[in-house]
Amino acid sequence: MEADVGELGARQMAGFKDFYQYASTTRVIAGRDLLGSAGFEFQKEGARRVFVVTDRVIRGTGLVERVEAGIADGGLELAGVFDDVPQDSSTEVVERCAAEAKAAGADSFLAVGGGSVMDTAKVADVVFTHGGSAAEQEGFFLLPRADDGQGRPLDLAPLACVPTTAGTGSEVSMGAVIKDHEAQVKLEIADFPLFPRLAILDPESTRTLPPGVAAATGMDAVTHAIESYVSLDWTPYQDARALQGLRLIRDYLERAVEDGPEDEEARGNMLIAASLAISISLGSTHAMSHPCGAHYGVPHGVANAINLPHVIRFNAEGGPDIADRYRDLNEVLGVESGGSDAQVGDALATYVGDLVAGLGLPTRLSEVGVPEDGIPTLADAAMGDGLTLLNPREPSEEHYAELFRRAL
Amino acid sequence: MLPAHPRSEGRSELPYFNDEDEVYSFLGRLFEDLAEDDELGPKFRKANTIVQYRYRNPDSQITVKLIEDEDGRVDLGDTEMEPEVVMSMEADTAHKFWLGKVNVTVALARGQIKAKGPVAKILKLVPLVKPVFPRYRTMLEQAGRQDLLEAA
């Protein structure tokens, strides 16, 4: 498969590009025993009547009660709790959450949960603040702005996040993904106001995380670090975050899964790794994994874990400038970084594949319910995913079909 | 006081196109040619959507029906078609796009192109447009509009 640089803006993987954009506006606090000061910290962001968004599993662990106590301890009021977020949240759930927050007289949101919970809270915040339906929010940099739409983005109600998984990074990102069950697509929404005002990273919040979920969400963080580093939309700022995130993942992911909640150092550092690795500038692995979730319910981290090695091999053969970026990652991970472009890609892909298997995760899409006759639909959907445009090597629909076959 | 339609790129030069008729003469004609193209037309119509391009400076609008197994249709200006996807941008940005001089992801990130609706249906067409760039260039050359080629 021949590399295609593309005419819509030449691929440039090094040097000084024509345009960079980087923002990271979330205040992060990380450490131990922080849940009790959730209110004290959130009031600094303007919250007064807090609406908590979570799911029933998390609520059942008692974690939400501890956060509620922290809200009260900080002198804030609890407006209500919405605990009806499913694993793959939807437009319907988002709209119900926003309506309940409005009815409760809330002025702010606090999400306690994983990616689905945090993304629900983000999009609910948009609907709560600006009105409209959840589906109408789809798109990139489209939230309401001052000055005839050309000025500063209008603020949303304050949002704080307490992530209970270490992977999604949604607690510090300006992106959200919500499923539209009717259309069988995942809606991608990204804009600056979606950066949460506050992220609280406390390993205590991942205490009840089962090892399998810790592994899958950890692989989501791995994928963010690797894909953001080789994205066409790379920046030196994100490079620094991705590389340091990957170092922490290298040192702590397996410990966090194998040793479980007793290893606070590992779980805490994985929370930080996930918040470093996240970016909305990713690539074809995510473009493939989104439809796997939308059509076959494959958990996002699992889909990424399976698809990532195949995309690495595909990209590494796209030219030395792409392969050189993988060489950097291999050096961080202690993987062979010499040899041909294909060899460096294969070395990294093999490392990732071994990591996935070692963590006990599925390694084939066929193991998680994806049928062979679903490939044309998946390939078509991957082509329409916005992240395809950010992949360093331009894939065709036929390329995607072949990658899905390899991953099957 | 802000102008009615501020320039998204902060430039002070005059727009490339003098009026909406010029937009329709070049960008509009390009869409009409594509709709009638035996090879590219069916590929674009796989998008199964109606997309409307709303241009500023000069204000103009092109609505394109891309429905599989149906004839293509391009409305210049007012239309009775209901768009599913709306792409808004300066007419200058559209001109540069069809010359192959716009990085779509950067334009989206900078707000130079705003896409509303199920954008995936349009994004999957982006790899298909490359063969169109030389066609647009040839159209301008044949019309004697070297000025438009050189300005972008």
Image (cartoon, coloured by chain):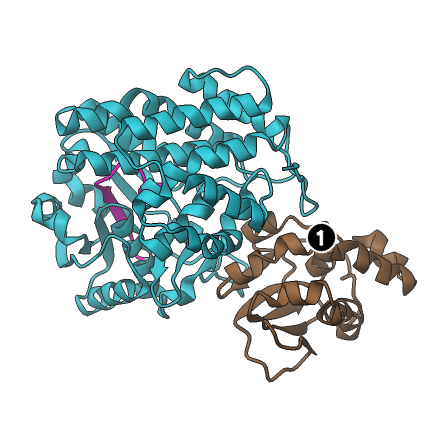
Residue A333 located left or right of residue A38: right
Residue A397 or residue B75, whichever sits in front: A397
Q: Which range of residues does the magenta coloring cover?
A: A157-172
Along the viewing direction, whichever of A201 and B129 lies nearer the viewer: B129
* Residue under the image location 74 percent in, 59 percent down: B95
Residue A55 counted in the magenta span:
no
Q: Is residue A170 visible?
A: no
Which quadrant would the C terminus of chain A be assigned to in this image? top left
Secondary structure at badge 1 equals loop
**Residue B67 location, x and y as percent?**
59, 73
Q: Colour of chain B?
A: brown
Count up the numbered dots.
1
Q: Residue drawn 66% across and 55% down?
A: B128
Q: Where is A176 relative to B79, above or below?
A: above
Task: Rate crowding at label 1 as few (under 14), some (14 to 19) or many (20 or more) other CA atoms within 10 Å.
Answer: some
Within the image, what quadrant is residue A285 found in? top left
Q: A349 above or below B83?
A: above
- Where is residue B130 drawn, in percent x and y? 71, 52
Percent x, y for residue B109? Answer: 54, 50
The amino acid beneath tag 1 is Lys
Compared across the picture, whether A117 is left or right of B93 comes to: left
Most distant residue in the bottom direction: B80
Which one is nearer the viewer's eye here, B122 or A293? Answer: A293
Q: Is residue A333 above or below residue A208?
A: above
Chain A color in figure: cyan
The answer to whether A287 appears left or right of A210 in the picture is right
Tell me the residue at 78%/75% (across/down): B21
At a point 11% along the width and 43% down the height, the residue shown is: A63
Residue topped by disc 1: B130
